[in-house]
Image (cartoon, rainbow, N blue to C red):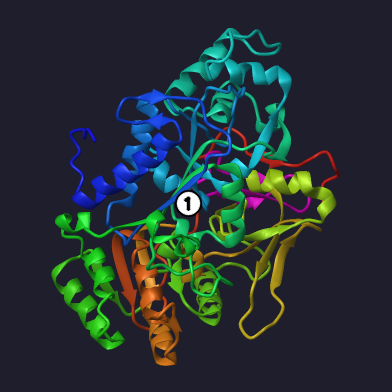
Amino acid sequence: MTLTALTFSDDQAEAHDRVAELLRGQGVDLDNARLTPRTEGKAGVLAITGKAGSGKTLLLAELVKALGEAGVATVSGDYEGRRRKDRRTLAVLAPTNKAASVLRQRGVPATTIHRIIYTPVYDPEYEKIAEWLAGEGERPEVEGLTEAALDRAFAYYQGNKSIPGALAAAGLKGSDFILGWKRREEPLDIGFVDEASMLDARQYEDLQEIFPTLVMFGDPAQLAPVNQSGEMVFDGLPEAQKLTLHRIHRQAADNPILDLAHALADPELGFEDFERQIEAAAARDDRIVVAGRVDSDLMARSPVLVWRNATRIRLIHAFRAAHGAPATELLPGEPLICDGIELPLKYRKKRLDLEARGLIKGAQVIYLGPGRRPGFTRLHVIGAEEPQVSAASIIKIEMPGEDEPFIPQAANMGAAFLHGAAVTIHKAQGSQWDTVQVFAPDLYAAARAGRVEAGQPLWKRLAYVAITRAESRLIWITRYRLGRPRQALGTGDLAAPAAPLTLTAEEPAP
């Protein structure tokens, strides 16, 4: 293997060679930058696992770069272009918008699994522009678009490689050029999946149908998907198809958050001992903070991470009360979490439209205000490539001690949302924030309960996932208290395109 200026550790180099060997068997020779057409019927699956800081994302990024240099085209959920038998393709996937956006910030052209499973149907007139931008056609003449508009689209695409973004730069809205969405009918080629610990069995089966060559990158210390008995999809692979990264690369940067995460592997470590380690780390490094109350300002963009739903609901109501939010309506800037799509089967096209635009279960959203039509809401989808949308919405605010939630706004059907100022650690998987608040009393309750998952105390798995959601700063909350806000809720920190996309289909609005 020929290495660039980047130096891999021994385990990363071994993993790189294993992936290269798998790809070579599928007709992609990374060492000699030589490609041959994909052979029908050949398939291969490989899992690369490792704890936080072991270098999985760095390895993934370097492999994506090498595939690009070899001539493998990257496929996104935006536009696929005409299929060619000799064309080799790669799709880099993540289970959530937030996880995909983390990769994109590191220069990896990632998209969500939903955006690959469901493909957009373009208006034939505007598809000519997409073909031209993708290098598959001549510069078109399109009625209603000036040469200057096409120049803007071209300039945008050169820097961002997003067809919808380029068409928006030309002055078009998504509803102008995308007629709808359909489930992918033909398989693709090579798939890389980050945060594979979040995959459930059904998603894994879908990905195997789409990608003959599948490489998964996952953390075995995280929490397994609900209803999978503590197991992750790569646990069932033969040992020959699994490779573990052991070296903790980011330890060289003296990262106290990772030090704490890996301390949890000690089987003799109890909860009280772990808290003493956190206190000691906080005394010598300001990236670790032990606090007696929750920061209510931070909750607006970075939710408090908890174990129990009862705690989550109590903290949400404390947050809303602290910000003076009316009981009967939301304030612009309040955070929401998508809880799924509530639509009957006959509105399948609308469901695909909502999911493809980022409103999938678990998506983080910021409330911007009511839409122009009854039942519609203007939203900012965190991590989505086109973040601002207007969608038929059902917003639920759960009440302490009540079985039924309060619903400040509701369409008859559409995207359902819960409040997002606090979320469970399970739902936080795949997301990262610069600063994270972890509600320690809940982890103590898990430790007292003595629950075990996949052979490890549950509180340790919860603590590991929670603290590794922090990119730069970890705040360990020790008491049931909430600090007063220092500033009012608002939306000024959110990037705003010229006009939000309205998510509707040809059927009447709910």
In the rendered view, would you say 87 is above or below 249?
above
**Side of 403 where 259 appears, left or right:** left
Percent position (x, y) of residue 386? 56, 39
Residue at 44% over, 21% down: 158
Task: Say if the magenta span includes residue 386.
Answer: yes
Percent position (x, y) of residue 32? 31, 25
**Side of 259 where 118 appears, left or right:** right
Residue at 62% over, 35% down: 499
Percent position (x, y) of residue 368? 59, 50
Q: How many marks?
A: 1
Residue at 55% over, 75% down: 317
Q: Quadrant of residue 222?
A: bottom left
In the rendered view, would you say 58 is above or below 469?
above
Q: Nearer the viewer, residue 345 or 419?
A: 345
Q: Residues within 10 Å of mark 1 (few under 14, many from 20)?
A: many
Percent position (x, y) of residue 217? 40, 53
In the rendered view, would you say 491 is above or below 141?
below
Q: Which residue is mark 1?
A: 98
Instruction: Name the amino acid, label 1.
Output: Lys
Q: Quadrant of residue 108?
A: top left
Residue 449 visible, this angle? yes
Q: Nearer the viewer, residue 94 or 399?
A: 94
Residue 424 visible, this angle? no
Give the position of the N terminus as an image quadrant. top left
- Please state the extent of the stretch shown in magenta in the rendering: 368-390
Q: Nearer the viewer, residue 225 or 144?
A: 225
**Side of 187 where 52 appears, left or right:** left
In the rendered view, would you say 272 is above or below 165?
below
Task: Say if the magenta span includes residue 113.
Answer: no
Q: Nearer the viewer, residue 346 or 87?
A: 87
Dot 1 falls on a residue whose secondary structure is helix
Q: Quadrant of residue 433?
A: bottom left
